[in-house]
Amino acid sequence: MAAMKPRTGDGPMEVTKEGRSLIMRVPIDGGGRLVVELNAEEAGRLKDCLLDVTNQLAR
């Protein structure tokens, strides 16, 4: 029987390029990670959305 490693939310938020995709890993409350696969267009739209909301918070 193979040993199983526990999944934890430890570690930084990160984005890596794998092939044509960008893989975003975000630690979540309660352990684990949210893993999202994006293409370049989707990543650009996500960036725009995040910039909009953070600019609104800064006002």
Image (cartoon, rainbow, N blue to C red):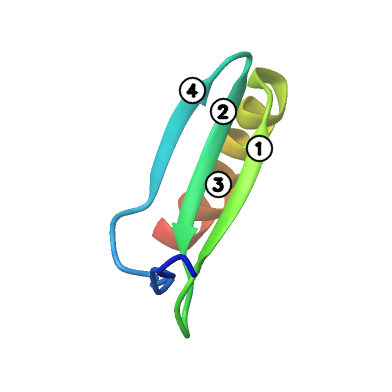
Q: Residues within 10 Å of mark 2 (few under 14, many from 20)?
A: some
The residue beneath circle 2 is 22
The CA distance from mark 1 to mark 2 is 6 Å
Q: Image height check: is 44 above or below 49?
A: above
The residue beneath circle 4 is 17
Asked whether the residues under the numbered discs 1 and 2 touch, taking CB atoms below 8 Å apart as contact, a structural biologist would say yes
The CA distance from mark 4 to mark 1 is 10 Å
Q: Image height check: is 40 above or below 15?
A: above
Looking at the rendered structure, which numbered label has been put on residue 37? 1
Residue kind at label 1, given as amino acid type? Glu
Q: Residues within 10 Å of mark 1 (few under 14, many from 20)?
A: some
11 to the left or right of 1: left
Task: Return the disc, 4 or 1, that comes first in the chain's sequence.
Answer: 4
Q: Is label 4 in a helix, a strand or a loop?
A: strand
Tell me which residue sits at (38%, 43%) in the image: 14
Q: Identify which residue, 44 or 5, lies in the foreground.
A: 5
The CA distance from mark 1 to mark 3 is 17 Å
x, y percent for residue 13: 37, 52
Looking at the rendered structure, which numbered label has been put on residue 14? none
The CA distance from mark 4 to mark 2 is 5 Å
Asked whether the residues under the numbered discs 4 and 2 touch, taking CB atoms below 8 Å apart as contact, a structural biologist would say yes
- Closer to the eye: label 2 or 3: 2
Task: Return the disc, 4 or 3, that comes first in the chain's sequence.
Answer: 4
